[in-house]
Amino acid sequence: MKLKLSILFFVFPLITLAQHHFVLNGVCSKNANSKNIYLTYKVNGKSITKSSEITNNKFVFKGELDFPTRATICTDPKFHMTTLNSNVFYLEPNVMNIKLDFDNLNTIVINESKATDEFNSLQNRAEKEKFQKKMDSIRESSRLYSVKMSGTSDSSLKIQFQKSLDSLNQLWDQLVDQNRNKSLQLELEFIKKNPNSYIAPDLLYNILTEGDEQIPYDTIYNLYYKLVPEVKKSFAGKQIAERLLDFKNSRIGCLAPDFVLKDINHNTIRLSSFYKNQYVLIDFWASWCGPCREDFPFLKRIYAKYKNRGLEFISISKDENLQSWKKAIEKEKIEIWKQISTKENKSTIEDTYVVTAIPVKILIDKEGNIIGRWIGGGAENEAKIEEVIAKIFDK
């Protein structure tokens, strides 16, 4: 009995380790000997990149994984990815086989990866190709009309060409929206039916961060809540849980997450220091964002009107180039209110407020509650912001 138990205790750790080890055996359908192929993925949030030399048209990748995880395979060492030189799939903690054409990774075939099969089922390559052909056609037509416009001095023809361009732009936007909405519904239905899928939290994360608030928080939270415990324990599961908490805490009606950051003049700005005395409008922007800068004449007018009546502005820039940020502030003449750089502060405040696209404006009352949130620029949002502020101060 003791011997049997000893064998069991010896074998069990090996079995446990094997469950966390992956092997990816690759075969190239074309001669790619002596070339390298590259793989990148994350384990507990840490990026891992590996390379493998192709010998006799074969290659292999090995590593450790706790859960199925999203990965990218690429023939470019710097991962300058195109549709031909890269592909996305899911690594699993087991032995997988992969077949590919080195010159066209669209032809990739992967076995022994359930998560990859599920991921591919949502891609619908035939529909994607059909959609891409439509978009390519619109792009080419737009190019031709632009050439015609630049090649004529006839004002009536220019007007006609511009109308055609406007129609094509409108059609482009419609097709993009239709395609995204269709994909969104397919993803939501998949998550609902497959709470045990390891791609579900990745899908939820993308929906939450890229959905522009199309999907209510409760809908996303309920889908997350119904995921099986093992999926929730994965890194992607933990990541969506953290994101959901940020999402919940940055909605209208919630207490605004406090922050302490240095402004452009190195003064300490604590959000909560304005409570009781002032309303605060936070503007997330960047110098390279056209719609952000187009809003500044409106913001300057509102600031001039209400700054002495209890309204403060805090602009938070996502610029990576600090010189571009400072030049834009000077050019737009917006140094009149507080300016903060996330890069200079090494801050992720935009994640805390779930800012996935800019501009985003958030209005906070004197009790520190979020009472307004607007995504995007333009006249419609400006009118809504002005209406809310006017109701506060022009009673």
Image (cartoon, rainbow, N blue to C red):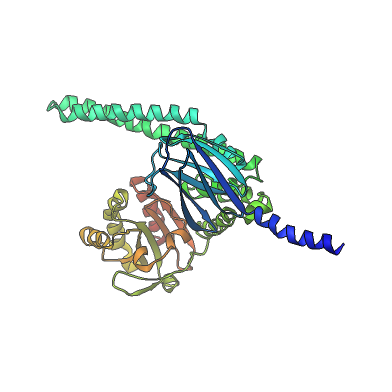
Report the quarter where the C terminus lies: bottom left
Q: Tell which residue pokes out farthest to the right in this image.
A: 1
> Residue 270 appears in which quarter of the rendering?
bottom left
Q: Position of residue 171 (x, y in %)?
A: 37, 30
Instruction: Reply above or below: 233 against 105.
Output: below
Q: Can residue 211 be seen in this snapshot?
A: no
Which residue is rendered at x = 56% and y = 51% of the image?
A: 217
Which residue is rendered at x = 65% and y = 49% of the image?
A: 227
Q: Is residue 344 left or right of residue 178?
A: left
Q: Position of residue 229 (x, y in %)?
A: 68, 53
Q: Is residue 55 left or right of residue 331?
A: right
- Residue in the foreground of this view, choosing between 233 and 79: 79
Instruction: Reply above or below: 146 against 16.
Output: above
Which residue is rendered at x = 14% and y = 26% of the image?
A: 152
Q: Can residue 79 be seen in this snapshot?
A: yes
Q: Position of residue 187 (x, y in %)?
A: 56, 40
